[in-house]
Image: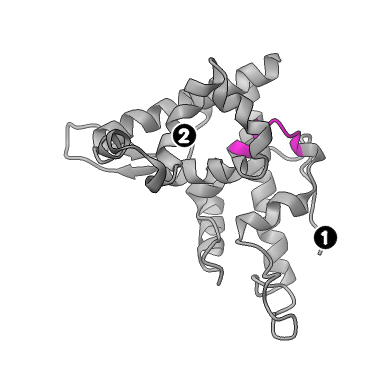
């Protein structure tokens, strides 16, 4: 199976709301339970862009199949559809192109228009007069999936006195609950605390990108 490579000079036109909805729908309809939704995908792509591994040098096969839960390499080849988990090569290509364009648009916004960047978080609408509460858990899970592709490369960033605190909200929101302290679980159980952590993610990610570009 051939996969396209990330090209930092490719089309950076942001996906429209309709295209984002289409991409989310295409992914959630796939037979693989491991396929990402649009929130996790958005976080995953952000993690790839911030990874110490240079994304343009990373083969598409190393990260693209993770988006749709893999190509079913563990399935019986005799019974597996040719384009698994997609119904056709056309659908596979469509998803790949949308993912790559969204990836490129994030990188472009971070560099050229960081004030316009809006990560895709869950939003819980509140009563009139109250601010909506946002929750970046799915986004953070996607981000940490990118971290898992190169854990040894990421370790110094999590341990660093500057970048570690910037990554902390992501690690807390997307981390394994069984590995969290009682205090952390209590914090995450409060929707307003989750909102505070989630809002910190936006600013922290932009700071991480600025630090990366300045290095």
Question: Which is more toward the observer, 88 or 16?
Answer: 88
Quarter of the image holding residue 147? top right
Question: Which is more toward the observer, 82 or 127?
Answer: 82
In the figure, is residue 132 to the left or right of 211? left
Q: Is residue 114 visible?
A: no
In the figure, 93 relative to 17: above or below?
A: below
Is residue 53 in the magenta section? yes
Q: Dot 2: what SS?
A: helix
Eye-nearest disc, 2 or 1: 2
**Type of colouring:** one colour
Instruction: Give the labeled residue for mark 2.
Output: 170
Q: Residue at x 28, y 32 (%)?
A: 193
Magenta stretch?
A: 47-55
Is residue 140 in the magenta section? no
Instruction: Give the labeled residue for mark 1.
Output: 2
In the figure, 42 relative to 196: above or below?
A: below
Q: Residue at x 69, y 64 (%)?
A: 92
Return the x and y of residue 168 as percentages of the image width and height.
46, 28
In the figure, 55 relative to 138: above or below?
A: above
Q: Dot 1: what SS?
A: loop
In the figure, 56 relative to 39: above or below?
A: above
Tell me the quadrant of the picture where the C terminus can be found: top right
Tell me the quadrant of the picture where the N terminus can be found: bottom right
Quarter of the image holding residue 56? top right
First of labels 2, 1 by sequence position: 1
Return the x and y of residue 41 as percentages of the image width and height.
55, 48
Q: Mark number for residue 152?
A: none
In the figure, is residue 128 to the left or right of 8? left
Residue farthest to the bottom, as pictured: 78
């Amino acid at each position: 199976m051939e996969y396209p490579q990330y090209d930092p000079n490719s089309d950076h036109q942001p996906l429209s709301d309709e295209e984002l909805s289409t991409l989310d729908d295409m992914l959630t309809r796939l037979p693989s339970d491991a396929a990402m939704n649009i929130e996790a995908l958005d976080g995953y792509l952000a993690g790839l862009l911030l990874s110490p591994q240079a994304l343009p040098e990373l083969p598409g096969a190393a990260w693209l199949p993770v988006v749709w839960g893999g190509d079913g390499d563990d399935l019986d080849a005799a019974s597996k559809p040719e384009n698994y988990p997609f119904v056709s090569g056309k659908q596979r290509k469509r998803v790949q192109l949308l993912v790559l364009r969204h990836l490129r648009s994030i990188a472009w916004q971070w560099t050229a228009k960081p004030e316009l960047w809006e990560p895709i978080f869950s939003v819980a609408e509140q009563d009139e007069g109250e601010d909506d509460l946002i929750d970046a858990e799915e986004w953070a899970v996607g981000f940490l999936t990118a971290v898992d592709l190169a854990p040894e490369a990421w370790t110094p960033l999590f341990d660093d006195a500057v970048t570690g605190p910037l990554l902390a909200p992501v690690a807390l929101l997307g981390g394994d609950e069984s590995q969290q302290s009682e205090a952390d679980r209590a914090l995450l159980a409060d929707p307003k605390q989750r909102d505070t952590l989630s809002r910190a993610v936006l600013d922290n990610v932009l700071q991480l990108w600025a630090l990366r570009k300045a290095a």
